Amino acid sequence: MAQFLFEADLHGLLKLDTPIPNAPPARWQRKAKESGPGPSPVGVSPMKPANRSHSSSKTPSKTPGKSGSKIQSTPTKAGGDRYIPNRSTMQMEMANFLLTKENDPAEESPTKKEQQKAWAVNLNGFDVEEAKILRLSGKPQNAPEGYQNNLKVLYSQKMTPGSSRKNSRYIPSMPDRILDAPEIRNDYYLNLIDWSSQNFLAVALDNSVYLWNHASGEIIQLLQMEHPDVYISSVSWIKEGNYLAVGTSSAEVQLWDIQQQKRLRNMTSHCARVGALSWNSYILSSGARTGHIHHHDVRVAEHHVATLAGHTQEVCGLKWSLDGRYLASGGNDNLVNVWPCTQGGGGDFVPVQTFTQHQGAVKAVAWCPWQMNVLATGGGTSDRHIRIWNVCSGACLSTVDAHSQVCSILWSTNYKEFISGHGFAQNQLVLWKYPTMTKVAELQGHTARILNLTMSPDGTTVASAAADETLRLWRCFEMDPIKKKEKEKANNSKSSIIHQSIR
Amino acid sequence: QLSREHQGITLRGSAELVAEFFSYGINSILYQRGIYPPETFTRVQKYGLTLLVTTDPKLANYLNNVTEQMKEWLYKCIVQRLVVVISSIESSEVLERWQFDIECDKTAKDDNGPREKSQKAIQDEIRSVIRQITATVTFLPLLESACAFDLLIYTDKDLVVPEKWEESRPQFIANSEEVRLRSFTTTIHKVNTSVAYKKDSVP
């Protein structure tokens, strides 16, 4: 019998929810007596803490972040300067039961097992019972200290400080003019502006093409697509400047006469939008989203004279060399192909070079006007590099990291330089000296990524079209008046010799 | 060259192709995500692309060990998944998780002879996946802090863990966004690629 009494006593002691008799008064009680009825009568008894849902049971806590412990914020009401738990509200019996209960998984019903398994698969993403996860120990060291992820450098890049060497010429940092280009399509893969030898700037705004006369400032709407869903994907002037080729999203290549403002031809041979065009005298080359390039002889009825299959994704860069011997194409498949102007022995066009080094889409493609067989290419967001190639040897002459998506490259005819257009984060144009590849200047102003660049016929001005719906004209290749006179003299003397001989 | 095309794919050949893909794929991820300085990578020609591989000897050695082991396990068809985990060094938080699921056709073990699929077709498929991995930099969130990577391999439960390998936790991302990339198949092994990244917390 004694043992039951003992047990009962033990339980009584352990419960502890009745005040211990004959104990010294607790601190709060003493304090209460001291402060008397002063601060607040509520402060006499310890605060009943809220949120009493905890117990040491196995039920998963609803808030995994919280530790679910008994620590609560100390009540600031007077009478208690520390937290004292109230044991009577605790579920001591429940806790005791759960602690002492035998862990018996055999009791679980088969459906419950299924459910648990489903939960496990859900949580882990695979069946834990079926697989185990391994890793090779001895991990290699991390990148050295002080190495900053270069992407972070890219995105946090501030303006680079000007070069210490004084520029030999003044390049205005503000554009000459800013033109409105509302509704211009913000699509990296399109080529929406071109400047003719007759000084007309053609701009494709969604489904219309406008011509801006640089000399007079006059604007003409040349054409508008009949179908509302069709948009213009590329424009390109013929060398003489009297015809404009227009590529559309409906896979058509149209030829327009500027004088009469009439459409001369509508050449259909592609099956996807035509994002790139380039002229080589009477041959018009078009690149489409399928990756195919077509040559069109615009003089004959059967215009489609050749197909070049070298890209597996959209052709976005297309440029004939100035001597008409090579055609360079860049695609979304990160490849650059250099095609000869004539077919190979087998009747097929085969590229003389294929460059795979770019890690992103290649839209910027440009031939050097003063050095034969030199080609500049620029890569998209994943690549950001500008590369200069010799297409005969296939060698990469130079590479430079431009730290930003390259949309276009233009070589200058007045200086030994080239200019590149960029996107995030600065949306700037950069002038580079060739072949030293040093930055001559950076032209800032656009508030969104640059999409296209084109140059004036006199080579002094570069027009940039950007996603901020503006066209900016930068007078960055202004000729020194003395040098200009020299150049003109040289040209004049040449013509006079010819006249003499004709006589 | 003609004979190579008609050789077909054997189990061993398939295991090699897939293991090779993982080697180049992991290198590409390490370069593109900036885990290691870009100067420590060199360009090589593979799959008709220019790919970047590390020149760091320790790292190259580590990756090599993993690739060799993968080859063996792929041959035995007991590996299910390869995961590249990218986590912040400071906070040990997992920021990105590249998952390559492997489906193995176990009947290939029965020596039925090589399967019909040209090397070129497989190469083209692999090329597409690698290009996609490269292009992901356009949408993946910037990795702000210095990061380290980890390689996890999910194998069959009853595999004997070889020396130098240890068991690990899956290392999931708490709140993630997932993007599926292309898959390729050698007709014996099929690899599905996806990348999960930590959803940007509300600024």
Image (spheres, helix red, strand yellow):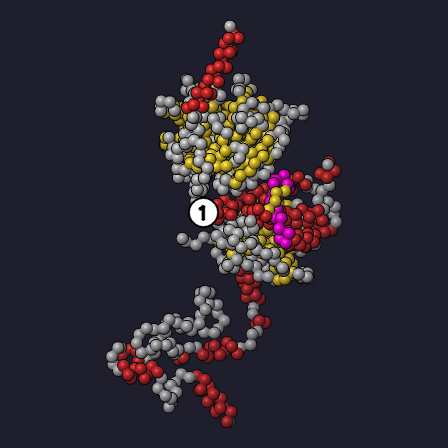
Q: Specify start and end residues of the magenta stretch as a single range.
A: B45-60
Residue ID for mark 1: A156
As displayed, is residue A243 above or below residue A125?
above
Kindly identify the amino acid type of the residue bearing the numbered disc 1: Ser
Res. A4 visible in picture: yes
What's the chain of the residue with tag 1?
A
> Farthest residue in the left direction?
A38
Residue A37: x %, y % from top left: 25, 81
Given residues A306 and A112, the one toward you in this image is: A306
Given residues A181 and A478, the one toward you in this image is: A478
- How many marks can you see? 1
As displayed, is residue A92 above or below residue A440?
below
Q: Is residue B157 left or right of residue A469?
A: right
Res. A306 visible in picture: no
Q: Is residue B78 left or right of residue A376?
A: right
Residue A456: x %, y % from top left: 44, 26
Residue A432: x %, y % from top left: 49, 34
> Farthest residue in the bottom direction?
A2
Q: Is residue A343 left or right of residue A10?
A: right
Q: Residue at x 37, y 71 (%)?
A: A73
Q: Residues within 10 Å of mark 1 (few under 14, many from 20)?
A: few
Q: Residue at x 57, y 26 (%)?
A: A372
